[in-house]
Image (cartoon, rainbow, N blue to C red):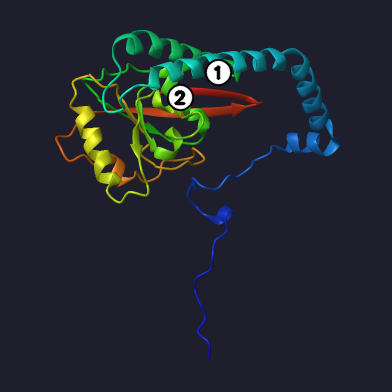
Amino acid sequence: MEAKSHFHELSPDEVPYKNPFVHRLSIPPLRRLQVSCGLQQLRFALQMGLIAVTILPFRLLGLAVFFTLAFLCSEMATRWSDPGKPMSGFKKTILLPVFNFFGRLVFFCVGFQWITTKGTRASPEEAPIIVLAPHSSFFDSLLVVLLGLPSVVGKTETANSPIGCLIKMTQPILVNRDDPSSRQKTLQEINRRSQSNGEWPQILIFPEGTCTNRSCLINYKQALMERKSDCFPDGPIRCRLLIRSFQLRLADK
């Protein structure tokens, strides 16, 4: 006699709590009617056609120009720099602010014209580490520009990519996933920079360690949050991406 199972697998729609890894598309009834009648497609086609002949050419031109200038600044600043020492002199006072300015213009060209910021940012001496959550997309890199290029924790492969010089401008802490001792080295480097009394820029950490749909927070990675020396204060930032009618807005707290 076969035993009956009292358990069954729930579909994503039946889960009673928020799932940060499942996207649910909710379409209002009026929008459904517009789509079924073809009105939504016609409106979208007219919008895209108008944008293609008015705004898009200027944005693409600005994007190409400002990205090239930012790339040249990063090459000048990182070509012969020592990653074990913080930037100083001409690189810190001139190249870093200029690169940050061009980076902000790049995001301006892709649609981030106005950013609403709430709260007061702590100094590197008060909070050497910035914790940013939730992490949802590539556009979260805008926070790196808005915060004045804090050091990021990332993979070694990103710094070795064709645009790796852009990553190096943040004076990053790189993690080598092929090295078993890389985690310990990363924690030691975070501790070392945290005790530099502002000599290094603040360290920006995405503690979730992955991207979600922004519906809720997930467990933080212990390897990113534990520090062996004294407990240093963190500066928490909440990143919100609001999408309404093809407009993307970002605010942080």
Q: In the rendered image, which residue does mark 1 sit on?
A: 67
Residue ID at (51%, 34%): 137
Which secondary structure lies at badge 2? helix
Left or right position of 123 against 138: left
Say if 81 sits above or below 223 in the image. above
Residue ID at (47%, 50%): 17
Three-letter code, disc 2: Leu
Three-letter code, disc 1: Phe
Closer-to-camera residue (16/160): 160
Closer-to-camera residue (99/117): 99
Crowding at mark 2 (Cα within 10 Å: few <14, some 14-19, many 20+):
many
Labels 1 & 2 near each other (Cβ < 8 A): no
Question: Which of the 4 image quadrants contains residue 173?
Answer: top left
Closer-to-camera residue (155/36): 155
Residue ID at (44%, 10%): 98
Left or right position of 110 against 18: right
Distance from the alpha carbon under mark 1 to that under mark 2:
10 Å
Q: In the rendered image, which residue does mark 2 sit on?
A: 166
